[in-house]
Amino acid sequence: MNPLTLSLVLTTMISGTLIVMTSSHWFMIWVGFEMNMLAIIPLLTKEHNPRSTEAATKYFLTQATASMLLMMAAITNLLYTGHWSIMKLINPTASIMMTMALTMKLGLSPFHFWVPEVTQGIPLMSGLILLTWQKLAPLSVLYMIMPLINMNILLIMSLMSIAIGGWGGLNQTQLRKIMAYSSIAHMGWMLAVLAYNPTMTLLNLYLYIPMTITTFMLLMINSTTTTTSLSHTYNKLPLITTLILITMLSLGGLPPLTGFLPKWAIIQEMTKNSSIIMPTLMALLALLNLYFYTRITYTTSLTMFPTANNMKIKWQFKNSKQTMSLPLMITISTLTLPLAPMMMILD
Amino acid sequence: MLKIIIPTVMLIPLTWLSKSNMLWINSTMYSLMISMTCLPLMNQFCDNSLNLSMLFFSDSLSTPLLMLTTWLLPLMIIASQHHMAKEPPTRKKLYITMMILLQIFLIMTFSATELIMFYILFEATLVPTLIMITRWGGQTERLNAGIYFLFYTLAGSLPLLVALIYTQTTLGSLNLLLAQYWIDSSTHIWGNSLLWLAYMMAFMVKMPLYGLHLWLPKAHVEAPIAGSMVLAAILLKLGGYGMLRITMMLSPTINFMAYPFMMLSLWGMVMTSSICLRQTDLKSLIAYSSVSHMALVIMAILIQSPWSFMGATALMIAHGLTSSLLFCLANSNYERTHSRTMILARGLQMILPLMAAWWLLASLTNLALPPSINLIGELFVTVSMFSWSNFSIILLGINIIITALYTLYMLIMTQRGKYTYHIHNIKPSFTRENTLMSLHLVPLLLLMISPKIILGTTY
């Protein structure tokens, strides 16, 4: 893309999110969301093929609907309370509508249907931005209105998301769809603890973003989007197979890797608040996620899949992909569990 | 404890920076030296544990298991030399790194004071083992084996995490040193039963209990030799160790919860021993015999009497050494015939007489011949089970007989009789293999002299 256009688009997208995160007026939050959505559409259609157009259209329609729901909720609140401030979303109708709108933007169940299809149709870099940066704005609004959200809806939606994120990803071999379902499940975990201790939501977000960035960067190095082509990695870049192994296991939440920390913290917060069945169910459903991550590691690192190449290794060229600070990301996303006591002080 | 952990961690740079021809020698020798460092921990107080720091402690239950863990690493490295000989140096180093990583996690698990740290490391031992089984196993079934292993264990242990955190929030601390002073006076509400279940299921799956044991034959059979050794010798004992620690904490009034597991263990013990009589696969036979011995340990821990705890601990150590020894012997067969079928390598006594001596000693200890420590374990368990319920002696007696039967079956099938005609061009026993077997047997036989160090906390 033309660098000028790219910088314009990225600036608008970033400033849209920043407007959302720093506003206290519902109208400005709506403005921020709209700016964000409109600016990302060119990024989604970077490749000019019909699949990208379809993905961008689906994204636009769901996000526009969600923004309109958000506006409706804000105006309902205005009707009943007489002001636009976001701190006082007291009316239950407005609160429920707002929660629906924001979870639609996040891609939580039962509004998750757009996530796999949009993620599948766009290039890997755009998918990365979609699954990480776009989560910041809705989650910050949810964090701000947290005391007034109806807990039943939140918990049901998060449990359904974890279940659907788990079961939905089981039948996938397309890596972007797998990452989409992974995002649905992780969003479910994040929202489950929102009512109890929103700091843990943020902790999960802060660890989910590096893990997803790492995964996408590893996929971008190989330029692969299917499990089959990822399984050829041992032939091209054998070190990457080890990195994929530990990143996938970390995403699945396996100790002693970092991915275990958000799950542990969330289970701890929920148990402290005498909710025991819910975290057990969530933890067991997270095993489904672990299954398809382990399946990816099986095809990639732990076995040598048949390839068309007869040589032990292919030619290794200089890496031309943008993999900004991959070692740092890998360290953050796999090795920071010993820092857990430090993160618990966020309590 | 750091004097054991830091050298073990430094074994990893040792592996990666060794020259290719010194790789095996270096790692074996230094890991043997580290196991010597563990020996001073045996100097235990009789009424208290060695409280080394805020994070690590060692008492007379964890010390024998620690010794077993550190003793086993050089043995695993010795055993892996042959089948790794043709791999490129990077992969050899990766394999040894996996073993060392596993060792680090195991040392920390056995000496952890805080139960959540125990849990994290308990789960952490799964990752290197999974990698060892799936990457370096022999057959295609290893993929399935890895999945079964991972998911059975995880599904059992996630409720344990929730239960541990719940106990931490209600009781305030999960430090094991404090746990011995709690008096749990909980009433008989069904929530407490669920809590007991949540605690125990993780360890039941790990032991394994009879109904949940499907992962074990798969994992043991498909794993490479080092994987089989560490699985049989140590990882099963993690379950036993966990159960021994937790039952001190849980309410003694929840004894009725133990009955289903007692039934499963009693019946499963006899069932898995009987299956051993009909196995054609040598490693599978040893795997099922592990299930049978561990069922004894489960029963001993569930009755919670001082003698049974002694028997459980002794049986864990004895079974660890014996099972690992049997797997090494089976592997020496596998490396020669590349098949695990028992009848393909018969009459080995004629051809490899020294190995036959090791087979004989291994079989004798497996069937709990007096005065070996296996006998001490089984005897203590049998006696305390008899005192718990007179009728259990029937099943226990049947199990002892069937254990003897299948062990002798295995011995006679592989060693005695006429050798097969295709066996005469196998390589003779390597010194390395004889060393391996004798390094297994020497602790086993020497412990006969002073078994009190493996009798655990209630001695």
Image (tube, coloured by chain):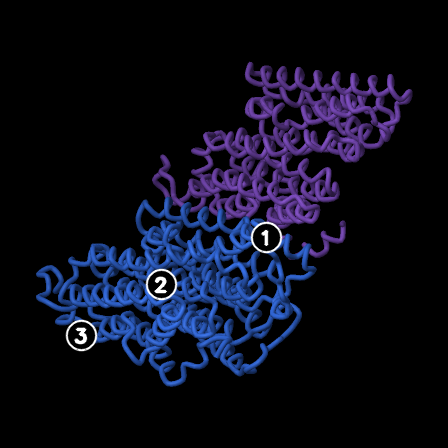
Chain colours: A purple, B blue
Chain identity of mark 3:
B
Q: Are marks 2 and 1 on the same chain?
A: yes
Say whether mark 3 and mark 2 are on the same chain: yes
Residue A9 position (above or below residue A212): above
* Callout 1 amino acid: Ala
Q: CA distance from mark 2 to mark 3?
A: 23 Å
Q: Position of residue A168 (x, y in %)?
A: 51, 29
How far from the left and from the top, in percent, is residue B259? Answer: 43, 57
Amino acid found under the numbered disc labelled 3? Pro
Q: Nearer the viewer, mark 3 or mark 1?
A: 1
Question: Any mark on residue B256, and which?
Answer: none
Whether the residues at callouts 2 and 1 have beta carbons within 8 Å, the answer is: no
Q: Tag 1: Cα neighbours inside 10 Å, few (<14), some, or many (≥20)? A: many
Marks 3 & 1, CB-CB < 8 Å contact: no
Specify the quadrant of the image occupied by residue A40. Answer: top right
Report the chain holding disc 1. Answer: B
Give the structural element (helix, strand or loop) at label 2.
helix
Residue placed under numbered mark 3 in the picture:
B353
Please name the residue that numbered disc 1 is placed on: B163
Q: Position of residue B179 (x, y in %)?
A: 62, 67
Label whose residue precedes the other's in the sequence (3 or 1): 1
Whether residue A4 is visible here, answered yes or no, is no
Q: Identify the residue under disc 2.
A: B80
Quadrant where the image shows the N terminus of chain A:
top right
Q: Is residue A141 left or right of residue A306?
A: right
Mark 2 or mark 1, whichever is nearer to me: 1
Residue drawn at (47%, 74%) of the image = B306
Instruction: Choose between B40 and B20: the one closer to the eye.
Output: B40
